[in-house]
Structure formats: C-alpha cells, structure tokens
Amino acid sequence: MKTDDLIARLVNDLPSSPTSAPARAAASFHSVAGLTLAMIAAAVAMSAMIYGLRPDGPLNGAPGLLLWSIIAFAALALTQRARAPDVALKGPVLALLCGLSALVLALAVFAHAAGQPMVRLDHVLHCLQTVGLLACPSFIVISVLLRRSAPASPVLAGAVAGLSAAAIGALAYSVSCPISDPLASLSAHAIAVLSFSAVGAAIGWRLYAW
Amino acid sequence: METELDDREERWSRWASAALAGDRRSYDRFLVEVSERVRRYARSRLSRSGHGIDEAEDIVQDVLVAIHAKRETWDPSRPIGPWVDAIIRYKTADAMRKMGRRAVAAEDIDAIADLATAHYDGDRRLDDLDRHLGALPSREQGVVAALGLEGMSAAKCAERFGMSEVDVRVAFLRGVAGIRRLVEGPQGAARGTRR
C-alpha cells in the first residue's frame, strides 16, 4: 500500500466527533487514585475471604499496610506515566526497586543482629503464593491499561506493573498474614514483591510491546 | 533553527489537538508532515546501518499506524514533538531489530553451515561427523543435519520438526557450537560463536 493511501485511510478512520478518550480520562490523578483504591479494596476483601484475618488482629499488620500502601501508590503513579512513550521511567523505577532491595537487606541485617535467621525460606515461599494470588486481579487490570498504551520500554513497564500489583497483594495480605514478627513478615513480603516485579519485567517485553 | 522547531511544535500541537476533536483535515496535514520526518529519519538510520533505504517506507507506515492507534496517549498539555519522536524511535528500532534478525539469521546459517562441515572433508572424516552429530541432543542433531548437510531452509526445517523458525535457528546455533566444542575444545567453540 502507498503511504498516501494509508494516510487517507487513517484520516477516514478518525471519528468525526471528539472521542471519549478513555486513555486520557484514565490519566487524571483522581481516576488513578480511584482505581488504586478500588484494586486495594478488592484485594483486601479477597485476602480476608480466602485467608481470614490475622490471629493477632488485622491492625497488627500496620507496618506492612503503611509500607505497601506507599509502594503501591508510587508504583501505580509510575505505571500511569509508563503509558505515554515520551516519559522517561528508568530513573524512578530503578530508584524504587533499589529502595526496596535496600529495605530487604536492612531487614535481614536487623534480623541477624536480633539473633533470628536473616530470611526464612518457608515464609518467602508462603508469601510468593499468597501475594501472587492476591496480585493477580490487579495485574490483569494494569495489563489491560498498559496494553492500550505505548510504553517506551515494555520491560520497565512490566517491572513497574508487577511491582504495583504485588505491592497491592502484599498490602492486602498484611491483614491476614499469620507471621507475627514484623521484620520476618516485611522481608518475606518484600522478596515476593521484588520477585513479581522481575516476573513482570520478563513478560512485559512481549506483553506490552506495541 | 530554534524558531523552526517552535513553529513546527506549534503547528503540530494545533493540528493534533484539532484531530483529537475530530478535525480530519488537520489530521491529514499532521500525518503528512510527520511522514516526511519519519522518512528522513528512517533513511538516515537505514543507510548508517548498511540496510537498503527501500525499507524506509515500511517504517514510515508502521509509525503512522502506531501514531493513529496510540493517539490518545498524547497529553495535549505536553509538547507533541517528543511524543512523535518517541514513537518514531520505538518503531524504527523495532523494525531494524526485525531486519537485523532476518539478515543475521540467513547469513549465520550459510556461514556456520560451511564452518560446521569444513572439518569433515573426505570420507574418513565423515565418520567423525556422524560421531559428533550423535553426541548432540536429538533435536539439535536433526536440525544441524537438515540445515547444514541437506541444505534445507529454516522454514522447511521448522515445518518438519514442528518448531518455530526462531527455535530452529537457536537449535542450529547450539548444535554447531556443540560440534565445534567437540572438534576444537571449549575455546574454539567460543571463538566460533563470537564471529
């Protein structure tokens, strides 16, 4: 096909009235915040239904709730930015991932200093399953949005999508997690979140390519 | 130069905003100007990388389709030039990656097939070839024999073994590296795969 003919076809395909612009509507801060809160509420409800509330009371998961709320909002704000091709993401995404990795390291050092194992593999495996399950619905929603977008780097978009969804999963699981030690619980959740971010990056290059 | 860029930015922003509001005439002007910019960029990238510039028009069309499909990711409060340039860079890199893969795969298969069989001139060495082929995993054995010895195309080979063409190429390269390791030792194999 000649380029002139293609242009004529594209022009004809343009709706003659202003579009509802779902992508642009979704770009507003309110809609991102609203969507985030809806995903968090759904994940918390799912966690309470599947795993029940933590034996020592859901508010004892406050450190996790606070940390993962911050990470989830920050990651979702980055996911929102990842939707346009002209937005640089590398710095903020790497900063967030490095911050989280530093947290895991610091928690491991604290645990070691307190005479506990640095990381318990059984906790990590448990959290990989629970956080992964609770992250799935959010990951699907985020992926639908990203697939309608044009991220300059599908890999980074995948990393940040995995991070957002897993942070929501970890936040939700904080109300159910039976691990009473906050150090052990946070470090196991953080490892799970970082793992899902890596999985997101690994599948993002294909899933979000356009 | 700066004024020219400012003029273009102002013009493109105006046209793109009007297009999002449904103005087809503005959209036509916008796409025509963008296509000229993409064409210049694609030709320059293709000629610098040693590809034929006749592929430029495919890149132009890919970019135009992407701009059309993703037009709502442009935020009218942001400049449009960087948005268009980001799409041009992404689509050009994508197209060149695909071209590179096609070209490299074709060259590799010819060159490596020669290398693979170069050690086996003469009847005596054919026994060695059988022995070395036999040491490979069965999938790599079949692919190396089909491509390197029978001269089959990657597409036909993929059909025969029920694999994708990419998998065929990977199996072939691994198989040849395996044979080179057997013939020359690990250092020889590493030298061969870096070619």
Image (spheres, coloured by chain):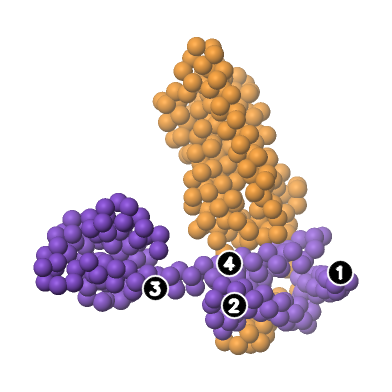
Residue named by callout 3: B107
Q: Is disc 3 in the same subunit as disc 2?
A: yes
The kind of secondary structure element at disc 4 is helix
Identify the chain drawn in purple: B
CA distance separating discs 2 and 4: 14 Å
Residue A89 percent across, percent down from the top left:
67, 50
Dot in front, 1 or 3: 3
Q: Chain of mark 1?
A: B
Residue named by callout 4: B93
The kind of secondary structure element at disc 3 is helix
In front: B131, or A98?
B131
Residue B133 percent across, percent down from the top left:
19, 61
Dot in front, 4 or 3: 3
CA distance separating discs 4 and 3: 21 Å
> Disc 1 or 3, which lies upstream in sequence?
1
Residue B163 percent across, percent down from the top left:
30, 65
Q: Taking B96 as reference, is A187 above or below it?
A: above
Q: Chain of mark 3?
A: B
Residue named by callout 2: B47
Q: Is disc 1 in the same subunit as disc 2?
A: yes
Q: Is disc 1 in the same subunit as disc 3?
A: yes
- Counting other residues with Cα less than 10 Å from the Cα at mark 2, is it few (<14), some (14-19), or many (20 or more)? few
Q: Chain of mark 4?
A: B
> Disc 4 or 1, which lies upstream in sequence?
1
Residue at 80 percent across and 73 percent down: it is B12
> Disc 3 or 2, which lies upstream in sequence?
2
Q: Taking A203 as reference, is A194 above or below it?
A: above
Q: Taking B143 as reference, is A156 above or below it?
A: above
Name the image quarter holding residue B191. Answer: bottom left
- Counting other residues with Cα less than 10 Å from the Cα at mark 1, is it few (<14), some (14-19), or many (20 or more)? few
